[in-house]
């Protein structure tokens, strides 16, 4: 049990769909992160939230829109995605920025 | 800006053999250092961390790592590898202070032969 849950675990969507990924942490942490992990590529940091404020947007296309309504929840809203956006999307949390991270199991996204 | 290099993309060892995975970092001050492990299709799990103090840190699953400031390295070791250790291993360096942005290495894939 990691204390960080992600839903859904698998998602198939068309290029014109709108969907959202959800992440929830039950650890009382103050920082949360979204990562993209594609095959054969390094782990890519997408967004960082600390105390519900976005502190990093790592040049991510606007078709990815994060939302952090409170310190326990993080969403990634998806719209008009491209096939190259197919990847494993990982959420993580840490007690605060700078500490170790606890990862969720990921959402396997396929864009058709 | 900080950076992390894991020079080995793949490492193959026999079960029961010792293991060392290399990690070199670039950062202007004393960093926070972490090792994570990822099984296929899963999230990453923290193996161990270094913040300060003793430069040899112990982690879960029998792993340890040593921080060597002079070599800017934080290599991961295990004296005897088990088949279940086959996975992807990631080194992560962070900055001390509140402005930490995670910087991961590309990962090293560990293959364990019976």
Image (cartoon, coloured by chain):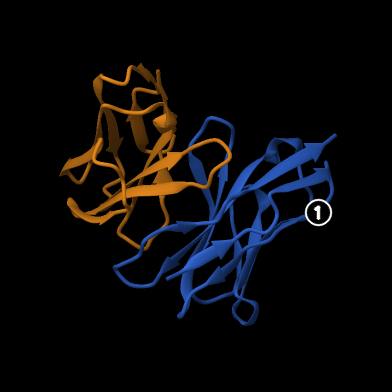
Image quarter where the C terminus of chain A lies is top left
Residue A74 seen by the camera: no
Percent x, y of residue A98: 36, 63
Circle 1 residue: B18
Check the image and report above or below for A75 versus B17: above
Tell whether A75 sits left or right of B2.
left
Percent x, y of residue B78: 73, 54
| Quarter occupied by residue B56 | bottom right
| Quarter occupied by residue B68 | bottom right
Q: Nearer the viewer, residue B59 or A105?
A: A105
The residue lying at 40 percent from left, 38 percent from top is A90
What tint does the image give chain A? orange
Label 1: chain letter = B
Percent x, y of residue A84: 43, 31
Chain coloured blue in the rendered structure:
B
Check the image and report above or below for A92 versus B68: above
Image quarter where the N terminus of chain A lies is top left
Residue farthest to the left, as pictured: A69
Residue A45 seen by the camera: yes
Q: Secondary structure at mark 1?
A: loop
Tell whether B38 sits left or right of B9.
left
Q: Nearer the viewer, residue B51 or B43?
A: B43
């Amino acid at each position: 049990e990691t204390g960080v849950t992600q839903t859904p675990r698998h998602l198939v969507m068309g290029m014109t769909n709108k969907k959202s990924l959800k992440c929830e942490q039950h650890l009382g942490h103050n920082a949360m992160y979204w990562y993209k992990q594609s095959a054969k590529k390094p782990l890519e940091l997408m967004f960082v939230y600390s105390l519900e404020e976005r502190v990093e947007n790592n040049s991510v296309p606007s078709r990815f829109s994060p939302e952090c309504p409170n310190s326990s929840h993080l969403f990634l809203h998806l719209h008009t995605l491209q096939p190259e956006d197919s990847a494993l999307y990982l959420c993580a949390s840490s007690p605060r920025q700078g500490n170790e991270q606890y990862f969720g199991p990921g959402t396997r996204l396929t864009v058709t | 800006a900080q950076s992390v290099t894991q020079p080995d993309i793949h490492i193959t060892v026999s079960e029961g053999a010792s293991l060392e995975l290399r990690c070199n970092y670039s950062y202007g001050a004393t960093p926070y250092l972490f090792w994570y492990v990822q099984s296929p299709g899963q999230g990453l799990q923290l193996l161990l961390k270094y913040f300060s103090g003793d430069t040899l840190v112990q982690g879960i699953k029998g792993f340890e790592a040593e921080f060597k400031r002079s070599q800017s390295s934080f290599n991961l070791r295990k004296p005897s590898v088990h088949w279940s250790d086959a996975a992807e291993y990631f080194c992560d360096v962070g900055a001390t202070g509140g402005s930490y942005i995670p910087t991961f290495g590309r990962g090293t894939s560990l293959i364990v032969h019976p």
